[in-house]
Image (spheres, rainbow, N blue to C red):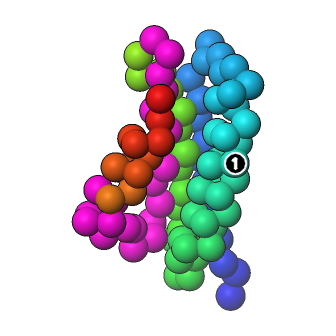
Amino acid sequence: MRHTIRYTAQGQTGLIFDLTTILPLGLVLNELIANSFKRTPCRGRDGGAISLTVRRAAEGAFDLLCAGSGVGIPQDEMEAEKEIIRSGYH
C-alpha cells in the first residue's frame, strides 16, 4: 500500500524579513514541517494533508498558519504554547 501526504505552501507576495527574523523563522519552519510530516497520518485512500501559509498581519508582523489532518494539539496545551511565544517576542 502506498502512503501519501498532500502538502501545500503559500506565501503572500511582498513580505520582507530582516536577518533577525528570518533565521529564527527558518528554524521554526524546519521543526514545524518536520513534525507535521511525522505526525500526519498517511494511511487510507486519501492519505494525509498539510497546509502552510505565511501572510502579513500588520505592518511589521505576520501570521504563520499550519494545518494538517493529524489529531492536533489539545486546546490547553495550545494556550500554554501561545503564552510562551508571546513572552519571548519583542
Percent of width and height locating residue 52: 55, 45
Percent of width and height locating residue 48: 54, 68
Q: Secondary structure at mark 1?
A: helix
* Residue in view at x 39 percent, y 73 percent: 71
In the depicted structure, whether residue 76 falls above or below residue 43: above
Which residues make up the magenta segment?
59-79
Could you classify mark 1 by the number of other residues whose Cα lies within 10 Å: few (under 14), some (14-19), or many (20 or more)?
few
Q: Is residue 45 visible?
A: no
The residue lying toward the viewer, choosing from 58 and 48, is 58
The residue lying toward the viewer, choosing from 60 and 41, is 60
* Residue in view at x 44 percent, y 46 percent: 85
- Numbered disc total: 1
Residue under pointer 1: 27
Is residue 43 rendered magenta in the image?
no
| Residue type for callout 1 | Leu
Percent of width and height locating residue 63: 45, 32
Percent of width and height locating residue 37: 63, 67
Image side of residue 37 versus residue 64, left or right: right
Q: Is residue 56 visible?
A: yes
Question: Residue 74, located in which quarter of the rendered image?
Answer: bottom left
In the depicted structure, whether residue 9 falls above or below residue 90: below
* Residue in view at x 50 percent, y 16 percent: 60
Is residue 71 rendered magenta in the image?
yes
Image side of residue 59 versus residue 47, left or right: left
The residue lying toward the viewer, choosing from 81 and 11, is 81
Q: Quadrant of the N terminus?
A: bottom right
